[in-house]
Image (spheres, rainbow, N blue to C red):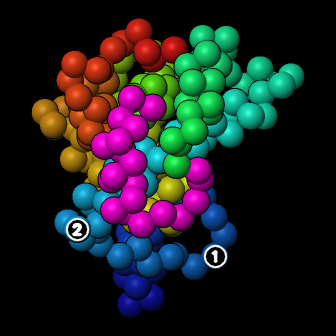
Amino acid sequence: MRRRWWKKRWLRCLSHLDYIGPCKYIPPCLDSELTEFPLRMRDWLKNVLVTLYERDEENNLLTEKQKLRVKKIHENEKRLEAGDHPVELLARDFEKNYNMYIFPVHWQFGQLDQHPIDGYLSHTELAPLRAPLIPMEHCTTRFFETCDLDNDKYIALDEWAGCFGIKEKDIDKDLVI
């Protein structure tokens, strides 16, 4: 009886999260929440890049090419500052400042596509992004699953960018630097 209870509990905890303590209940992702996820994620990617740019004095966190692209975002006075914004504002900002979101989406793809660098993201390559997000963003797994349009267990650049609302004409392998 005890063994069956432990196995049941272990199976529920199979999220591949690395922390100490009891399993955290992760609620199912509702459809309405799934539509909001890319709004927050896009904004977060943009803010991560801007923060890296601001801290990059001597650390070489970004390449020179990356710095040039992020400098334009950093200097844009219309840029929505980092913060906890309502989804309506994030959606409006994406429409209004669409171009400043193109590079961060490509950049993140390049950061994840490492083992091997083949133009596709595997489950393993998504893990460094997925694991820390799940406790805060319970739609992470479902979002990545919906990005895999052809269900081949890999996310290509066009699938990735499309998930974030990047138009097909703006998807450019040369931006994955």
> Image quarter for residue 2?
bottom left
At horizontal 13% and vertical 33% (from top left) the residue drawn is: 150
Q: Which residue was labeled with disc 1?
A: 21
Q: Which residue was labeled with disc 2?
A: 32
Q: Tell me if residue 73 can be seen.
A: yes
Residue lying furthest right: 58
Considering the numbered disc 2 on the image, is that residue within a helix, a strand or a loop? Answer: helix
* Residue type indicated by callout 2: Ser
13 to the left or right of 156:
right
The answer to if 92 sits in the magenta stretch is yes
Question: How far apart in space, not on screen, are marks 1 and 2 (Cα)?
Answer: 30 Å
> Image quarter for residue 96?
top left
10 Å neighbourhood of mark 2: few (<14), some, or many (≥20)? few
Say above or below: 170 vs 162. Answer: above
The answer to if 163 sits in the magenta stretch is no
- The stretch in magenta equals 81-100
Say above or below: 9 vs 20. Answer: below
94 to the left or right of 63:
left
In front: 56, or 2? 56
Say above or below: 118 vs 15. Answer: above
In front: 118, or 71? 71
